[in-house]
């Protein structure tokens, strides 16, 4: 069973990974975007860490909803509302129980990812975070073992964005020139899913 | 890094403190990142709120004041602001007549402003929203995020601002803003890439002697790279791109806009070529504005925006404006 | 070469054609290289003529209009104009009340304006001349050409212009201009060198990560090179240099001026540091102006000018001005 | 005897030499000045050539006065009034005779150079055009043979400006940093004197 502490660990792993890879994310965003994805997420997850230190909700759902709200209020850009919605929607789906099963989390995350797709209007193949998030939630099963599979699927998904032409977000302005670059949002999504696997290890 | 900054993390807050010091006629809320007309909310007047990533100065903060914006919400450099800013701005400028959000069409801006609409409506503010999407370098289709908002933002903010100042109701101000956007088209070129404080190196590599055609204002590369062209050739190319997308049926406002690092001397020279090519193509020019207004930090380059105007829009354009960056009349 | 030009030889003429198109409220004589108030000569008003090399835009042409200059004479890039221009300008703006030449203290400007004085006096114009020499980076001694004229030019032109507009006689306008210059001091720093159209490469080599202290506005290297400093450190250094030369006995006007390629975002942030250090040193600030006003083509960097003002100078500073680059009041 | 045609040849040699060395002059001016000396003189001597094609004064003095006036009206900068004065004052001293002797020219040029010193307030050693002009006119004698000596003296004078610290003109702003560079004005003066030697050859 996964309790609020597990979710705090997940989010703090996210913060660590994003911090570590911030320069790379910004580098990727500079090739086909506006060179801010790394600093956006650094700022966002630092704010999440800070708010979770101040307020300590006891339910997984409340932790994620608080974190999501904080991302929305501190990131800006496209990724702020999108990742914020991912966490908020997932948290909402978890309800206010004190512990959730991996299967419940998998189901809730699928709803979170669907909410991202709906908000941004993107679908698989558009070269966005969805290209990492969708394979990840598809790989999630009934046990925490599946977190590692989700991580690998997200990583594969991020790599698979390289040959794609972007159809959503800033990278779409480049048309064919967006081909040949890895999508920054898909890359950070892979980090977030990797953090999930770390939190359970 | 050739920057006049302390650390990348504080550039926006530092700039707001500097604006506060230079412009006692504005209310600058550094903590909440808002620039507001000192006399807001103005009784009987629709509020106009815009915002977007920083790095495009004087857009938007330099356009706050009588006759233009009621408030501006600056985000981090090239990052759209967060919904809390726009919701707070809406509350601060709403006199009961409602508030118009002027949003440049970028995914981030659209999503954050949409969330702000929800927040502000929860607070009881009547809201309308206009998207600015004038950049013809981007194909507007189901398979892109749509055209970007660039130079036309200035036209929309000035003209809708004049309408609001004159007491037009929300629906009318919104309709006028929409008309200005629909009548406007832009195209931009870069002679150098931009360096953001956070990255510290140019966002793309543009060798001297080449230029990027169809760039945006966020350091994104353009659609095409070519060997350097003369001012005359660039004017022909840019004006052609704009006119091919929309051939104005009447006189136009012309914005010859610098991206930040192109000297005014060059911009004025470029304007001579823009006017020449417009004359050659039979486009009548009503007014021309030349300067660095919708910029991209230290990028060298320029953009041209044409906005077809009828008598009403021209009257609103000529109406008095009192902001940090745009002032005339009274 | 990253320039928006046709050929180096025509940049000044091209820019004048572009100014003419953008500013129907000015008389722009492209052939004779003059920018003149449309209503000149104004009956009963002393004429104010300035000029200098091009490449410092909006100085001087952007400061022509009611409340500031009567005419401006642009030379080639970084090259003072020729006497014929100033003589012709003097004749065009003289209403019989005489003309004041505002001359930045550079050998070329001084010599050419002096020759223009002779020519214009031959035509019967009563002339006075004020030298602007505010740059404390240059030692003022018998063994140099004396201090350079930089940012204070804007203060002199604005304040003397307001005095002339108010109908002050030539002697009074001259005395006020002289008082403004004597009350003003400047210091500038460069974060990059400048590239002139004629040369096409930077005038000096400034590696990223270093800055030049004490630069002028013509691409001359400064007095000293140092490793890059923060905005806060630069503000301390610059303000210190200015105050060491002249400690104001009363409130000051502050000009935080960009050299051309430094983004407004950075300039405003720098202004926050300038204001902080002035407060720490007990200097009272009456007004602050932030922007690219006395530039050096595409140079990145900034300068700070302080001008001590009494009540009269402050009133004249606040008086209405209607030019391309500076506008307020009415 | 030197007639108006000789002076026209001199000035057209000036134009040719200045054209050929313009980039170098600008380069020198970029090290300690504002990178315009080459284009300034190119513009100036091109204008002189043009006006002499239109108007053809018959007296040496008139040729030089016209050329000097044209430099003043077309160059700008420090060098425009200075070189303009050099030619005008020299021309004035030659009077309106149809031919002059080398000795008369030498004497007139000395007055021209003195006028430059007076106008600019500079003296030998200040690192200006005077450091080439003064040795040149000192080397001028009663025959045209002395023109070559003057050329060499001017060249030496220009080279001798390298170790000097500038006390006049833009280069003086640099203080000690002006040391180690050849003065552009002294260099162009050496060209003008070299043109004199060419005109007689
Ligand atoms: N419509 C969308 N749907 C899903 N993801 C998107 C969409 N638009 C952009 N993204 C993701 O957001 C990432 C960029 O985030 P970020 O750089 O933080 O924002 P911005 O583009 O506003 O600068 C992209 O790499 C992409 O993965
Ligand atoms: N006061 C002076 N007296 C004599 N020559 C001078 C003086 N000031 C400058 N010069 C000469 O003028 C040259 C520079 O000319 P130029 O570059 O055309 O003008 P500017 O300095 O106005 O750009 C210098 O190299 C120097 O030889
Ligand atoms: Mg981005
Ligand atoms: Mg962004
Ligand atoms: Mg010069
Ligand atoms: Mg020079």
Image (tube, coloured by chain):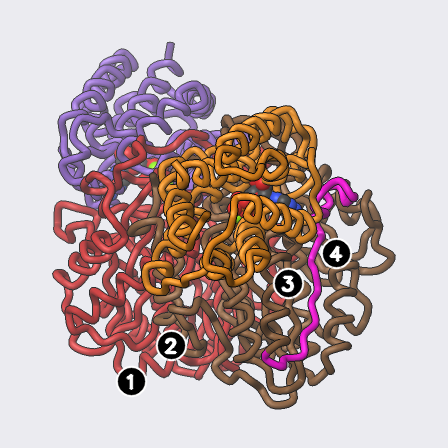
Chain colours: A purple, B red, C brown, D orange
Between residue C190 and residue D138, name the one nearer to us.
Answer: D138
Mark 3: few, some, or many residues within 10 Å (few <14, many ≥20)? Answer: some
Circle 3 is placed at which residue position? C114
Between residue A103 and residue B136, name the one nearer to us.
Answer: B136
The image shows residue B289 at horizontal and vertical percentages of: 38, 67
- At a point 54% along the width and 33% down the height, the residue shown is D150
Q: Is residue C80 visible?
A: yes
- At a point 44% along the width and 78% down the height, the residue shown is C25
- How far apart are the two marked residues, 1 and 4, measured between alpha carbons? 47 Å
The image shows residue A35 at horizontal and vertical percentages of: 37, 34
Q: Which of marks 3 and 4 is nearer the N terminus?
A: 3
- At a point 41% along the width and 32% down the height, the residue shown is A41
As displayed, is residue C130 above or below residue C227? below
Circle 2 is placed at which residue position? B317
On whether ligand 2 comes within 8 Å of the CB at mark 4, the answer is no
Mark 2: few, some, or many residues within 10 Å (few <14, many ≥20)? Answer: many
As displayed, is residue A88 above or below residue D65? above
- At a point 40% along the width and 67% down the height, the residue shown is C19
Asked whether residue A113 is drawn in magenta, I would say no
Q: Earlier in the sequence, mark 1 or mark 2?
A: 1
- How far apart are the two marked residues, 3 and 4, measured between alpha carbons? 23 Å
Residues at badges 1 and 4 in contact (C-beta under 8 Å)? no
Circle 1 is placed at which residue position? B311
Which corner quadrant of the image does residue B152 belong to? bottom left
Query: Seen from this angle, which residue lies furthest top?
Result: A201
The image shows residue B10 at horizontal and vertical percentages of: 57, 39
């Amino acid at each position: 069973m996964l309790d609020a502490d597990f979710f705090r660990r997940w989010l703090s792993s996210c913060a660590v990974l994003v911090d570590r890879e911030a320069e790379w994310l910004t580098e990727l965003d500079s090739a086909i975007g506006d060179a801010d994805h790394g600093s956006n997420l650094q700022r966002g997850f630092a704010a999440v860490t800070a708010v979770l230190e101040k307020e300590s909700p006891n339910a997984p759902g409340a932790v994620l909803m608080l974190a999501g709200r904080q991302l929305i209020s501190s990131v800006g850009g496209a990724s702020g509302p999108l990742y914020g919605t991912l966490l908020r929607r997932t948290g909402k789906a978890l309800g206010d129980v004190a512990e959730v099963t991996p299967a419940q989390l998998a189901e809730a995350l699928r709803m979170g990812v669907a909410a991202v797709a709906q908000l941004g209007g993107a679908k698989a193949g558009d070269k966005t975070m969805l290209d990492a998030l969708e394979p990840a939630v598809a790989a999630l099963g009934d046990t925490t073992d599946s977190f590692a599979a989700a991580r690998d699927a997200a990583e594969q998904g991020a790599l698979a964005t390289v040959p794609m032409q972007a159809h959503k977000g800033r990278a779409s302005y480049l048309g064919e020139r967006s081909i040949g670059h890895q999508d920054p949002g898909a890359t950070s999504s892979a980090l977030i899913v990797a953090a999930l696997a770390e939190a359970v290890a | 890094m050739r920057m006049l900054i302390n650390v990348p993390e504080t550039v926006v807050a530092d700039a707001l403190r500097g604006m506060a010091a230079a412009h006692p006629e504005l209310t600058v809320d550094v903590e909440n990142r808002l620039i507001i007309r000192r006399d807001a909310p103005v009784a009987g007047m629709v509020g106009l709120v815009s915002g977007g990533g920083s790095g495009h100065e004087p857009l938007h903060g330099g356009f706050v004041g009588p006759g233009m914006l009621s408030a501006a919400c600056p985000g981090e450099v090239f990052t759209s602001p967060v919904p809390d800013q726009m919701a707070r701005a809406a509350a601060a400028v709403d006199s009961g007549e409602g508030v118009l959000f002027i949003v440049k069409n970028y995914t981030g801006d659209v999503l954050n402003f949409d969330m702000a609409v929800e927040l502000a409506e929860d607070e009881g503010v009547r809201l309308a929203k206009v998207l600015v999407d004038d950049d013809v370098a981007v194909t507007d289709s189901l398979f892109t995020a749509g055209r970007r908002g660039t130079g036309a933002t200035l036209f929309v903010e000035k003209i809708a601002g004049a309408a609001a100042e004159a007491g037009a109701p929300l629906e009318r101000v919104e309709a006028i803003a929409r008309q200005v956007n629909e009548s406007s088209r832009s195209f931009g070129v870069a002679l150098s890439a931009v360096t953001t404080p956070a990255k510290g190196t140019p966002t793309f590599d543009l060798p001297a002697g080449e230029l990027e055609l169809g760039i945006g204002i966020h350091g994104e590369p353009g659609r095409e790279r070519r060997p350097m062209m003369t001012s005359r050739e660039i004017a022909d190319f840019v004006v052609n791109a704009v006119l091919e997308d929309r051939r104005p049926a009447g006189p136009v406002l012309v914005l010859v806009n610098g991206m930040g690092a192109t000297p005014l001397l060059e911009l004025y020279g470029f304007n001579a070529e823009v006017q020449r090519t417009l004359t050659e193509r039979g486009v009548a020019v009503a007014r021309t504005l030349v300067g660095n207004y919708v910029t991209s930090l230290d990028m060298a380059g320029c953009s041209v925006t044409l906005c077809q105007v009828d008598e009403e829009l021209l009257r609103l354009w000529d109406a008095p404006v009192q902001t940090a960056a745009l002032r005339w009349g009274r």
